[in-house]
Image: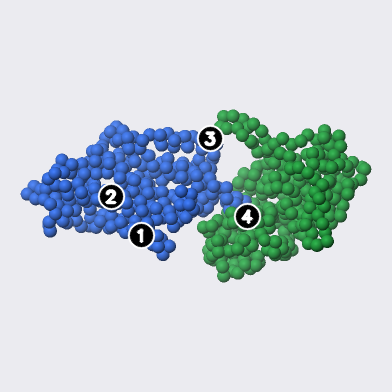
Amino acid sequence: MSSDLIIARDLARYFPLGGGLFTKPTAWVKAVDGVSFSVRKGESFGVVGESGCGKTTLGQMIVRLLEPTAGQVLFKGDDITHLNRRELSPFRQKIQIIFQDPYSSLDPRMTVTSIITEPLLAHGKPTKAHRRQVAADLMKKVGLRPDDQKKFPHEFSGGQRQRIGIARALCVRPELIVADEPVSALDVSIQAQVINLLGDLRDEFGLSYIFISHDISVVEHICDRIAVMYLGGIVEVAPTELFISDQRHPYSATLLAAVPRPDPNHRIQPAAMEGDVPSPIDPPPGCPFHPRCEHAFDRCRNEKPKLINVTDEHAVACFLNDGQGGVK
Amino acid sequence: MKRFFGNKNFLVGFILSAVVLGMALTSLVWTPYDANSMNPRHRLESSSFHHPLGTDQYGRDILSRVMVGAVNSIVVGLVTVSIGMGIGVLLGLAAAYFGRFADEAIMRFSDLLFAFPAVLSAILITSILGPSVINAMFAIGLFYIPIFSRLTRAVATTTWKREYVAAARACGRSEWAIVGRHILPNILSPLIIQGTIQFAVAILAEAGLSYLGLGTQPPDPSWGRMLNEAQTFMDMAPWMAIFPGLAIAWAVLGFNLLGDGLRDTLDPKMVRVR
């Protein structure tokens, strides 16, 4: 499809475990294993899952901070998976990332102007005046006072620091922003502000987002489509409204049921799910979710379900959807 | 600035070191007498108006020699710390960046250097290469390399994992630019602190080597050398030993306190760890 901005094809990333200088790794952590999706221009694509499910690794592969072990990343049809630093440079301007931790993601020894306009330095030699101008404009856009240009990161609050990080990502006018848990480190009251800001910026700059979060209630606010990850793979993809009303994977259902609703009469159902996420070093055979799934049957224990479309827009990796309808 | 001078260690260290530095700088343009000119008629004189710190066995003015000796000590400190820091930081950065094999190789090399007792090895090196102040500086500097390479590796490894480094990479900056703009500025404080402390140690080490006759050669004045010459005349002219000895203690104490003060103010976390 020509409107696809970015396509991930069978992306995988394994991390070696153990093994020294002369010994082979004893095992591989399959952080991401065979993930495919596409994001259209102007779309916000949410990726949700528990911690350790590989969503951050996935995001870092999209911006090429991590090399995929296998698979491809296509940006507007160009394969950017194996480009070297120089070849990658034009794409670096188009794909930016916002980090989770607003404390670790800003260099404590640089002024706000230097931080925000650092991407300009990677793609040319901007003058000081130009950098100041760009920084002031961006600071206004993200709701910071342009007078604070010469301040250092420690002089700002967490929410303000995250705005600085957003301004930096916007500096080179990207088309896609990978937002890796951009609000999880912030207070709830600030979270809403930052999410609204991200929404406004999307409309103003025509951005697309890959929005990574463990919190469905955050993702459903801003995203057009939601993908649920479990143990390194996508188990369900659907447009947000459809996902909320008609999620088909038992894991998605449990995730949604666990979202706290600000309603005093709403009681959270006792968790239908027991146990912990299995280790990605030694994933269970068959469906990775079967040890925790209340609907699991024999086939789930032996065979790994593929992600198959139940409708045009809705894909699920669960045998319960093999023609017999969904679980509710 | 007030932050620094509010720290007692820094204040005292700063004053002591400033005196040594001032003495050295003054001696470059003026000393009471030529430090090497002999005057047998006034030999082994105790302190007087003409020779405030007395004279030695050749009638040379001890104040002048202590002043010129300060230059010697400071040069030794600067050169050895530069050798150790220059090479050590490069090795440490390489170990932290490349990891795995390079890391192992560099750190085992550091262990190897650490395993030798520094002073004994310096004696060995200067005896092989021949006694001179240049060889002494080389020997001391060599044993500073692992100190700085380990320190650099430790702080650079954590700095490299920061998200602002990932952010710089994501916007396309080269690895060299990342080292120059993000890594080095963020590891500078511990390096400066360690450098100041090693500066003091170098002064002491050079004095030791010169005392043994392996460092500065006569007739150039060096505090350690002066102590060596003084021991024959300990009974007759104790001032010959007292003043250079005092100068060593003064300078070493000064730069050590300066280093401690810098650490307290620049890196408050390091104190709490201890």
Instruction: Estimate the x, y position of residue A122 in percent, counting from the top left.
Output: 58, 54
Dot 1 or dot 3: first in sequence order is 1
Q: Which residue is mark 2?
A: B249
Q: Is A298 placed above or below A249 here?
A: above
What label does residue B101 carry, if any?
3
Which of A145 and A78 lies nearest the eye of the viewer? A145
3D distance between C-alphas at marks 1 and 3:
44 Å
Question: Considering only order in the chain, which callout, 1 or 2, is on the residue closer to the N terminus?
Answer: 1
Task: Select label 3 or label 4 by which is in front.
Answer: 4
| Residue where numbered disc 4 is placed | A101
Query: Which mark's residue is nearer the viewer, 4 or 2?
Result: 2
Label pair 4/2, CB-CB below 8 angstroms: no
How far apart are the two marked residues, 2 and 1, measured between alpha carbons? Answer: 17 Å
Q: Extreme top residue here? A: A23
The colour chain A appears in is green
Q: Is residue B39 left or right of residue A22?
A: left
Please provide percent x and percent y for residue A272.
Answer: 82, 47
Q: Which chain is blue?
A: B
Please name the residue that numbered disc 1 is placed on: B11
Q: Secondary structure at mark 3?
A: helix
> Crowding at label 3, few (<14), some or many (≥20) Cα neighbours within 10 Å?
few
Say which amino acid is labelled 3: Phe
Please tell me which residue is depicted at 41% across the width and 51% down the height of the picture.
B193
